[in-house]
Structure formats: structure tokens, C-alpha cells
Image (cartoon, coloured by chain):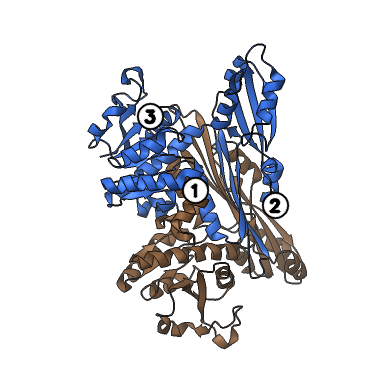
Chain colours: A brown, B blue
Amino acid sequence: MSIRIGIYGYGNLGRGVESAIRQNPDLSLAAVFTRRDPKDLKIQTEGVPVLSAGDVLSFKDEIDVMILCGGSATDLPEQTPSLAEHFCVIDSFDTHKRIPEHFERVDAAAKAGGKLGVISVGWDPGMFSLARLYSSAILPCGKDYTFWGKGVSQGHSDAIRRIEGVLDARQYTVPVEEAIAAVRSGACPELSTREKHTRECYVVAKEGADLARIEHEIKTMPNYFADYDTTVHFISSEELAREHSGIPHGGSVLRSGKTGFDLENAELIEFRLKLDSNPEFTASVIVAAARAAYRMAKRGEVGCRTLFDIPPAYLSPLSDDELRRSLL
Amino acid sequence: MSIRIGIYGYGNLGRGVESAIRQNPDLSLAAVFTRRDPKDLKIQTEGVPVLSAGDVLSFKDEIDVMILCGGSATDLPEQTPSLAEHFCVIDSFDTHKRIPEHFERVDAAAKAGGKLGVISVGWDPGMFSLARLYSSAILPCGKDYTFWGKGVSQGHSDAIRRIEGVLDARQYTVPVEEAIAAVRSGACPELSTREKHTRECYVVAKEGADLARIEHEIKTMPNYFADYDTTVHFISSEELAREHSGIPHGGSVLRSGKTGFDLENAELIEFRLKLDSNPEFTASVIVAAARAAYRMAKRGEVGCRTLFDIPPAYLSPLSDDELRRSLL
């Protein structure tokens, strides 16, 4: 009897979850819930119902784990607490500074309903967070570095699109290779924002738009671009579609630390991801966490959790014996 | 009130544990136990007693976690089960294929005494095992690669020392950079033993020894060298002491996997270590695990565990709130 998964919200992440479930024979897709008209939604898995988000509560007994695939800006802050009272839920809430507040709300709702919720699952927050936690626990005398990219930042791409005269845009976050190399060498450099990442923008402008003004607006935009060395390329919509339609991402979490009575030895830990598809990888982490959430819920655990709280073995379909024999 | 640690066995690893404890203000060294005459042992921490291994049971109430720092060949298979009945224990048992059997014996002893034991803590087994577990759970359609080095292999160095005419030796395991590069590129190559690692040997021979015979014996030694491209350098004992006295190690665990409905996207996970001191890093992992073991024991957990069973948050001195705020 497989673990029955519900998908709530069917964009890039929802599709990623649908495809990840196929790689895990102990999981099955039970239903997809959408705020659109279900008739208009075509999913890839035959025989699985597409249902209206409004009807979700009638499926409490048909779903073991509900995976919320909405966005962190407005969807998840409302949806996760509201569903956590009725379902075992997982989300990928990724607004780092609002995590404590989101945690509290999901925790309260899950406890009220006697359910388990897991938030902020993915790669950052998620696997990168785990790398930071493990490596800082192991090397207390040390310094963390997180580099992102090369990869597409949806938020920065959206910010460019809001500029007058811009039809479409794609922004890549690019780590500065010299900075990574310095950290990998065992040095503990102090790096400014500008020294860690550059930003590359591919912009499709309206015909006749003032390109110099657009470029200036991008490069001086506070928070998003002003603190970075930014390059702007104006290209055609055809080129954007042809060369920039992927959603790659990745990066490295490094910890450079010292050991020994006189801190005479340098130790370096690096966790690195190179992803063709950001949403599909995020979905793959979420689906493994869904297995863990199911097991924790079965044990009677209640309230909100993150990957920090999940014993690693719970994520794997292998038994404890098999894990010790084959992976330890 | 800090967590009181006992060190059982004071070689390179024991000294590493002693120095790691200094980096963790919530831990304190309570005592060092040795099979040598305690009078002959000088440790680095003032005011801490050095005691005879035979007296260890009288210190049941003075030690919260006993860290066993003996070797996997003969010490730990006997010591860990025997102490697990009386203490919360941790070891770094690293004979991979005997782990299931060691686990069973420690589990039985710990349960008999109502204690908790954690075995096989370090980097391989240990952090590399965690990397294999997390990455295989996330990317079921994929392939694992573990590369070791460049680093000193104690077992291979010892094997050379047993050859007639050899005074001393140091063996480095060296990963083949082209093989790592191929895996990092997203390919899933099938790699033979010979294609993954080479072996470099620095040998001090007795005066007048038959160097050609020694080199031949090394290169044809089954299990240790016959399956590898091996180079042998004869050097003086002065050069060995000057250039090869460190105990560096490290390596990479990679998982190359595919996602998407048609497995059209490649995802790569890499966990990499670059260590000046193999025993000090191993000790640093063990000391973090000692904190976790203490917490699990306090919760009433009993029996044998590995890092696979430990919620990551237990390893950190930070509270759950702080972890979510600062590292998630």
C-alpha cells in the first residue's frame, strides 16, 4: 500500500512533484488540486483526478501527505497553516527571514488538528540549510559561505519585467569563481556582496524603448542590483525563448574551519549542487521529505518540523538494515 | 552544566577529541582512560585525570558520554559492546562490511544496560554515508560515486611496512581527476577500480635492500595494490619525516541523477571534504555526535544508533529557534 500524495497547486513545482513521484514506487499520486477550473488542467498521470482547491477538505481520508506547490509571497503563508489543521502537509516556503513566523503559524494549526507539517523543504532552504547545520556543528571554529548559481533567479527576472519598456527578461545569478577558489583554498576571506556574485540580465525591450534608461534602471535598482556588478544584454524574444528557456540553478555551501590545539589544521567542507531544473530538484527533495513526514505522522508526531528535525533514514525507502549495509 | 566526556584510548583520535572538546563550550573533558600505565601519559588539558582502562566502571556516574578512540581491527569490536552496557558510548568503527554485526552486538549490550550507543561516526563511515543517503533518497534515478583522497591510507601504509626490507612507508590514495571531472560533467560513467584512484607510495628501505623486489611486491599485492596504477618512490627517512608527516585526507561523494517526465534533466549533488588532519576532523564529527547522543539518551532512547538515525538539529549547540532563524 503506497503513500498517497496530494498536489495542491500545479505550476512548475507541482509538475516536478508529479514527475518525482514516478521515481518512487512507494508513493502514488492521489489527486491534484487547483484554483483554476479543473476542466482546464491537463496533468501527465492517467487516472488521477484533478479537483477544485475549494473541495480539498472532502479528501481528508484519501490523502496521506499534501504537498503545497504555491509561491512563498502570498500563497503559502495563507495555505500551509490553513491546510495543516486537516492534512499532513509539506511546503517549500523560501522567504528566509519570515520562516520563524511561518513556522509558528503552521505549528499552531498542525497541533490544533493533531497533524504534522514540514516547511521550507527544497535546496535553499533545505539541503543547503542542512549543509550549513552539519558543517557548523562539526567545525565550530570556522566560517560559512553560500554561493548561488549559475542560475535563474525568478525574483530578479520579475523585477526587471516590471520596468517600463521591458517585454520579458531573464536574470542569472553568477558566483565569482575567484571568490569560490579563495574559500576552497582554505582561506577565510571576508567577502562583500559584490565580491561573491555578479548578475547577468537578458532583456527583451519594446520596439523604440530607451535602452540606456532601462539599463540604468536595472543597474541602480536597490536591493536587487545596486550592490552587484550587473551586465545587461538586450536580445530578441526569439533568442530569449531559444537560449534562456531552462530553469537551471545550483551553488555551493562551504565551511572553512580550523582544528587542533593551536588551530593549526585547516578543514574544508563543501556541499555543491548543479541543477538543470531548479523546480524538479526542489520537488525531488520534497517528495523524499513526504515519505519522512508520513512515517513521523504514523509515529504520532504532531506540529511543525523542518529538515533539521528529520532523522535522515526517514527520507529513504530502504530499511535501516539495508541502509547500514549498503550506504554506511 | 556541561556534558561530561570520557576519552577511552589516547592515540591520534583521542588527542583529536581532546582538542575538539575545547571548541565546544557545552562539553567538558572529564577523564581519559588508557591501557598504558596512566603515569606515562601526558595529556594537554590541565586538571583532567588520566586513569587506567581497568578502572573505567567506577566512573559510571562521572561520565555522560564515553568516546571510544581505539582501532576498528581489534579494539572496538570488543570494547564498544563491553562499555555500551554501562555508558552512553560513541565509536568510529570503520570496517564497512562488519558494521551490521558490530551494530547488533552494541545494540544488544546497550539495551541490556538501558543505554544509548552511536557507532561508525566520522567521515567515512559518517559524513560521506550521510551524503550517500540524502542524495540517493532525493535522486532515485541516479548513480553514486565516492572518491577518496588525496590522503594517507594507514592500512596501505602498514601493508607496505610489513614487506621484508622496508623500514617505513607512507601511502597516498589519489583520485583520478579525469574521472571526477567526468562525473561532475553530469555523465554517469562506469568506472573500474583502476580508473577511479591511483596509489602513491613513499618507502624507506633498509640499506642494501633489493628495491626492485620491494617495488614488485608492493605493486602486485592483492586487494591493496594489484588493481591500481601504483607508483613507488624510495626516499630517505629524513625526507619521509620532513615531507610526509601529516595525516591529510578527504574526497568527494557525488550523485549524478536525472529528473523530469522523460528524465531529460541532469542534477548533480557533490559533498566534498579537504582535510589537513583526518583524525582531528573525525574527532570533530564524533564530538558533535556526542552532544546528540547525550540528548537522545536524556529523552530515554536506548540501543544502537548511527548518524542515519540522528535528527541533524541534535548535533548543534544552537536551539531549534536559533537554527531556524540563522541557518535555515
**Residue type for callout 2:** Pro
Q: Earlier in the sequence, mark 3 or mark 2?
A: 3
Percent x, y for residue A216?
67, 59
Structural crowding at the residue carrying mark 2, measured as other residues with C-alpha within 10 Å and reported as few (<14), some (14–19) or many (≥20) = few
Instruction: Work out how far the residue at label 1 is from the one at label 2, CA to CA, in angstroms.
Output: 23 Å
Q: What element carries label 3?
A: loop
Percent x, y for residue B73?
46, 34
Percent x, y for residue B94?
48, 40
Q: In which quarter of the image is residue A301?
A: bottom left
Q: Name the residue under label 3.
A: B9
Q: Name the residue under label 1.
A: A328
Q: Quadrant of residue B205?
A: top right
Residue plotted at (37% across, 52% down): B322
Can the viewer see residue B86 in this picture? yes
Q: Mark 2 points at which residue?
A: B189
Can the viewer see residue A187 in this picture? no
Q: Are marks 1 and 2 in contact (CB under 8 Å)?
A: no
Instruction: Work out how far the residue at label 3 is from the one at label 2, CA to CA, in angstroms.
Output: 42 Å
Please tell me which residue lies in front, A231 or A67.
A67
Answer left or right for A156 relative to B102. Answer: right
Query: In the image, is residue B298 above or below residue A213?
Result: above
**Residue type for callout 3:** Gly
Chain ID, mark 1? A
